[in-house]
Image: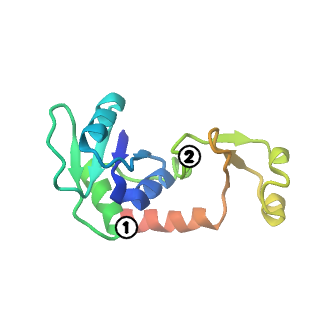
Amino acid sequence: MKLLLTKELGRLAKWLRILGFDAEYSQESKPASLIIQALREERIILSRNHRLPVSRGLKIIILKEEKIREQLREALKILGIEPNGQIMFTRCTICNLELAPIAKEKVRGKVPDYVFQTQESFFICPKCSRIYWHGTHWGNASSIIKELNG
């Protein structure tokens, strides 16, 4: 499932990426450009903008919630998807690309010393070169998944 989130849903896009979903974020203000991108990339548009035009062959979901956790819960419910820890942190939270494993030795000096000493698995974004590992953020996101599923 490929998603396209409008400019007012940047935090939601990041959280959907954390959960492992393909969630592009657009800062485009012209509805026509947004619709063209969604059609070209076969994406579902998520927005809070009630004035987006209805377009044939395109699915647009208008979210009502204002707070991020409620937006996340609402989006997952409407889309009929359940978050699971298996795909969590498989995408870059900035670029939305799938992360690739990287050898521990290649991240020496690029991550804090404590992280290098205590972690064994590292992942890198092929576009922005941001490095990821299973840190405390992993546990925080897992808690939110449990809350959303519970």
Which quadrant of the figure contains the C terminus? bottom left
Q: What amino acid type should be assigned to the residue bearing mark 2?
A: Thr
Name which residue lies at 30% across and 55% down. 75
Name the element at disc 2. loop
Q: Pinpoint residue 76: horizontal percent, then vertical percent.
A: 32, 54
Within 10 Å of disc 1 (Cα), the crowding (few <14, some 14-19, many 20+) is: some
Q: Residue furthest top?
A: 40
Local packing at callout 2 (Cα closer than 10 Å; few below 14, some 14-19, many 20+) is: many
Occupied quadrant, residue 111: bottom right
Residue 51 located left or right of residue 81: left
Q: Nearer the viewer, residue 23 or 104?
A: 23
Q: Which residue is mark 2?
A: 90
Which residue does the image show at 50% across and 54% down from the upper left?
18
> SS at mark 1?
helix
Q: Are marks 2 and 1 in contact (CB under 8 Å)?
A: no
89 in relation to 57, above or below: below
Q: Residue 114: x and y, percent? A: 81, 66
Please indicate whether residue 106 sits to the left or right of residue 93 in the image: right
Q: Is residue 84 above or below residue 4?
A: below
The amino acid on which the numbered mark 1 sits, given as a three-letter code, is: Ile
Where does residue 117 sit, x and y in percent of width and height? 84, 61
The quarter in which the N terminus is drawn is: top left
Which residue is pictured at 63% across the width and 67% down the height? Answer: 136
Q: How is the image coloured?
A: rainbow
Q: Tag count in the figure?
A: 2
Left or right? Give the position of 143 relative to 3.
right
Between marks 2 and 1 in the image, the one whose residue lies nearer the viewer: 1
Residue 100 at x, y percent in the picture? 65, 39
**Which residue in the protein does label 1 denote?**
68
Residue shown at the point (36%, 43%) measured from the top left: 3
Q: Earlier in the sequence, mark 2 or mark 1?
A: 1
Cα distance, mark 2 to mark 1? 21 Å
